[in-house]
Image (spheres, grey):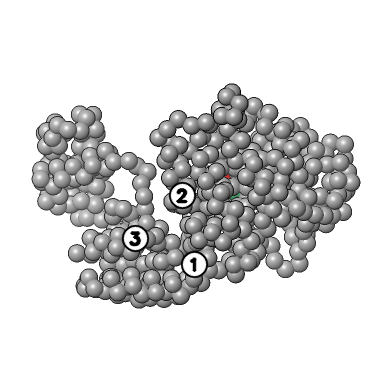
């Protein structure tokens, strides 16, 4: 807190330039309304700083300086709010940073679809109205072994429409250990309530047996549901019922079985040295009647909720009026279709799909990349900056593979200004560089840096420290 008296503050407030006087300094190009808004915001923020005692010098209030601040603010108002950032956190499927990056071939197909008319809902063979889902249904069935498929806006929507169609007003049996919260306030019991289905919890948090499901089935039962424990794991004295056991029970009692796989993946990560995550194909093969999963988690595509399963059930879901409300747009459809084509060759998928490539990146390559970045930073000769290369652990993110520790390498920075300040400066760079802070040091895990981004990081550090 400053020692300025009330009198001193009043004098500072008097120095604040008038808006009318500021605006003409911002030229004529930008719309008048935006120029005025930029000036107002800058003056308001200076006033707040004076009143709270965070500004007690006269220099920052000079006309030149305030005009410069207003120019920068106007620049921000004129540029898009949603923009690229550099992800140096090492969290691969980072929900706050946009989850998955699309492969080049996918972007090209999306671009072509954006620029031109398309057969989105037009059957070219028959010359009549077609279905937008036809473009991905066949390939989804081919890849998963399911009879039918549908795609909606996201997996939360997929859960909502599936429960609402198959179980509204009736009971859905779910294990207590699977009533997950995903983050962003998505909780299975809440979504179930919204769908109109009635939750029938069975078992205990750590153990649920087949007999628990059996005992819960009654005339009101519509569905047996299994939810993948995406973002946590119960360890120790545990027991859960597999999809195939549940499917056998469902067949015996004439009840469909629905699995919300959460992330959902089409390649077997176990084959590539990671912890095995159940694939969509496995769930279908084990007898699940309906399976839903996300497009932008481990699948590495656009935001979407994919529903696959038995034709008779999918037909009902397709006819639900909610389907129209949850439908995906043509750009999502274009990118999803192009992505699924890559999955026809799993070895190509793990090379070309950035999410998979980053997850499976060779740790020696990551180390070399970290060393090279550290060399580039040291070459700047920035005073006071300590640069180290250290092993670290990357995370899969996206509420998937919570126990998977991905061995990685980071460039670690120390500076007298403190890691919090350095982190903030990197975040305010254009493009922003997002890093982790640990033990008052900035940690940049290079696993999630893309081609060409090392030079951006170096430029950001130079701008932050000179
Ligand atoms: C992530 C997740 C969802 C929600 O998927 P979105 O695509 O983010 O809407 C639903 N269920 C489970 C189990 C999940 O892990």
Q: Nearer the viewer, residue 66 or 35?
A: 35
In contact (CB < 8 Å): disc 1 and disc 2: no
- Residue under pointer 2: 105
Q: Nearer the viewer, residue 314 or 262?
A: 314
User: For the point 76% across and 44% down, which residue is it?
Assistant: 289
408, above or below 167, in the image: below
- Residue under pointer 1: 361
**Within the image, what quadrant is residue 20 found in?**
top left
Sooner in the amino-acid sequence: mark 1 or mark 3: 1
Q: CA distance from mark 1 to mark 2?
A: 20 Å
Secondary structure of the residue carrying numbered label 2? helix
Percent x, y for residue 207? 78, 59
Q: CA distance from mark 2 to mark 3?
A: 21 Å
User: For the point 72% across and 42% down, which residue is it?
Assistant: 147
- Residue under pointer 3: 453
Secondary structure of the residue carrying numbered label 3? helix
Secondary structure of the residue carrying numbered label 1? loop
- Is label 2 or label 3 in front? 2
- Image quadrant holding the N terminus, namely bottom left
Percent x, y for residue 337? 55, 43
Q: How many neighbours does mark 3 have within 10 angstroms: few (below 14), some (14-19), or many (20 or more)? A: some
Residue 193 makes an appearance in the image: no
Percent x, y for residue 229? 66, 55
Q: Is residue 345 left or right of residue 141?
A: left
In contact (CB < 8 Å): disc 1 and disc 3: no
Label disc, if present, on residue 139 of the rendered structure: none
Percent x, y for residue 111? 42, 40
Q: Residue furthest top?
A: 128
Residue 375 makes an appearance in the image: yes
């Amino acid at each position: 807190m400053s020692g300025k008296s009330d009198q001193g503050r009043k004098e500072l407030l008097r120095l604040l330039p008038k808006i009318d006087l500021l605006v003409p300094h911002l030229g004529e190009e930008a719309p008048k309304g935006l120029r005025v808004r930029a000036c107002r915001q800058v003056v308001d923020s200076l006033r707040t700083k004076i009143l709270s005692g965070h500004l007690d010098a006269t220099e920052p209030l000079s006309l030149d300086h305030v005009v410069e601040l207003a120019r920068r603010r106007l620049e921000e108002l004129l540029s898009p709010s949603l923009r690229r950032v550099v992800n140096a956190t090492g969290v691969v499927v980072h929900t706050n940073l946009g989850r998955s990056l699309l492969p080049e071939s996918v972007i090209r197909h999306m671009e072509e679809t954006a620029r031109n008319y398309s057969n989105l809902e037009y059957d070219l063979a028959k010359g009549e109205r077609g279905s937008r889902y036809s473009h991905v249904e066949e390939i989804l069935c081919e890849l998963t072994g399911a009879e039918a498929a549908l795609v909606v806006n996201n997996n939360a929507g997929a859960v909502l429409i599936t429960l609402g169609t198959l179980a509204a007003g009736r009971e859905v049996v779910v294990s207590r250990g699977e009533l997950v919260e995903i983050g962003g306030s998505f909780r299975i019991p809440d979504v179930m309530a919204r769908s109109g289905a009635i939750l029938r919890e069975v078992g205990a948090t750590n153990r649920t047996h087949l007999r628990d499901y059996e005992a819960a089935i009654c005339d009101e039962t519509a569905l047996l549901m299994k939810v993948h424990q995406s973002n946590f794991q119960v360890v120790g004295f545990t027991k859960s019922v597999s999809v195939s056991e549940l499917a056998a029970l469902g067949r015996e009692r004439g009840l469909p079985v629905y699995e919300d796989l959460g992330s959902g993946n089409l390649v077997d990560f176990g084959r590539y040295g990671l912890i095995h995550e159940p694939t969509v194909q496995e769930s279908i093969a084990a007898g699940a009647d309906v399976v839903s999963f996300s497009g932008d988690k481990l699948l590495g595509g656009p935001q979407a909720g994919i529903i696959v399963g038995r034709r008779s059930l999918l037909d009902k879901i397709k006819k639900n009026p909610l389907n129209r409300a949850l439908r995906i747009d043509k750009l999502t459809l274009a990118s999803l279709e192009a992505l699924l084509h890559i999955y026809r060759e799993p070895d190509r998928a793990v090379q070309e799909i950035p999410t998979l490539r980053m997850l499976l990146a060779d740790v020696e390559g990551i180390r070399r990349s970290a060393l090279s970045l550290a060399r580039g930073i040291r070459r700047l000769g920035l005073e006071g900056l300590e640069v180290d290369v250290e092993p670290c652990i990357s995370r899969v993110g996206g509420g998937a593979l919570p126990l998977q520790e991905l061995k990685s390498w980071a460039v670690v920075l120390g500076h007298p200004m403190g890691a919090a300040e350095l982190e903030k400066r990197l975040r305010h760079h254009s493009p922003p560089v997002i890093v982790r802070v640990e033990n008052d040091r900035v940690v940049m895990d290079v696993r999630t840096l893309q081609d060409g981004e090392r030079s951006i990081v170096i430029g950001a550090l130079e701008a932050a420290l000179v």
